[in-house]
Amino acid sequence: MSVKERFIEYLRSQVGCIYVWGAQGETDITEEWIRKKETNDKNAERAIALWRRRKAEGMDPIAAYDCSGLIMKFLMDEGLYRSDMSSRGLYAAAEKISSRFDLAPGDLVFRHNGSRIYHVGVFLGDGMVIEAKGRDDGVVLRTIDASSKSYWNRYGRLSVITSGEAEDEPYYPEMYYYSGATFVNLRETPAGDIIGRVNKNDKVLMLSRQDGWAEVIKKESRYIRGWCDSSRLKKA
């Protein structure tokens, strides 16, 4: 199993855990410990309320994380980083990705408030993100646009997560056809300029699929590479 696969498997296993400021996977949790970790009494009460709810639901063990702690726990346990980093540190260490449409599973997504990075999550593919969201919610898995399209506004990739990808199973593009009634626009980028169209029953070679968009190659008088709505594409 590659580092990226282990990373994603680990993240999925933490869904439901609680959020505590500065936490990094601790499981020996008490109310006193939460109060010592938290920034004020109000935040401590919120974290304690979720911890009690998880206990009542029978969750065992219950781990505590903050947003960067969820990620750093894995990176440090794997020996990929020796020192802790905040969300800003992770952003500084990551290779920048310009668009969410270029995200791959294991990439990091960030929130930026106009002056600084202050929150981080992980893209898992198929439009889903996992994050230690906050004291009322804990670790959640939800769609990338669950809070709004502008909730995540910075993106990055850690080479320590993707370095072993060459050993993974290769991906072979497959042929699809458009099954809609008329046509769908082919765009230069997802939601970008229109560069052509895929007509009913036209065949395309699908290179990737993300957030309801498909990156395809279509042959006309020349080969055109672009993005289109994937909802009516069927395997040929």
Image: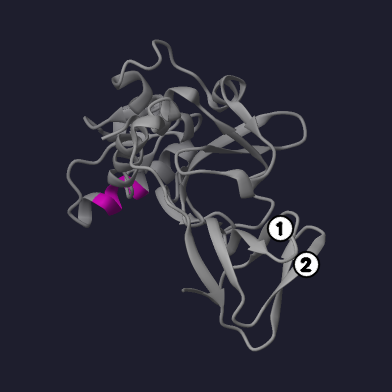
Residue 135, quarter of picture: top left
Residue 224: which disc?
1
Q: Label 2: few (<14), some or many (≥20) within 10 Å?
A: some
Looking at the picture, does residue 173 appear above or below residue 186?
above
Count of numbered labels shown in the rendering:
2
Who is closer to the viewer here, 144 or 59? 144
Q: In the displayed image of the protein, which residue is found farthest to the bottom?
A: 181
Instruction: Estimate the spatial distance between the alpha carbons at disc 1 and disc 2, rounded to whole Å.
Output: 8 Å
Query: Residue 216: where, in percent of width, then height?
Result: 61, 59
Stretch in magenta: 50-54
Query: Residue 209: where, in percent of width, then height?
Result: 53, 58
* Residue designated by label 2: 196
Q: In the picture, which quadrant includes the N terminus?
A: top left
Q: Secondary structure at mark 2?
A: strand
Residue at 20%, 50% (x, y): give it. Answer: 59
Q: Is residue 179 magenta?
A: no
Query: Residue 223: where, in percent of width, then height?
Result: 69, 57
Q: Secondary structure at mark 1?
A: strand
Q: Is residue 208 left or right of residue 192?
A: left
Query: Residue 78: where, in percent of width, then height?
Result: 30, 21
Looking at the picture, does residue 48 appear above or below residue 85?
below
Q: In the displayed image of the protein, which residue is found farthest to the top?
A: 82
Q: Is residue 190 left or right of residue 30?
A: right
Verify CB contact (< 8 Å) between mark 1 and mark 2. yes
Q: Label 1: few (<14), some or many (≥20) within 10 Å?
A: some
Residue at 51%, 37% (x, y): give it. Answer: 107
Residue 233, quarter of picture: bottom right
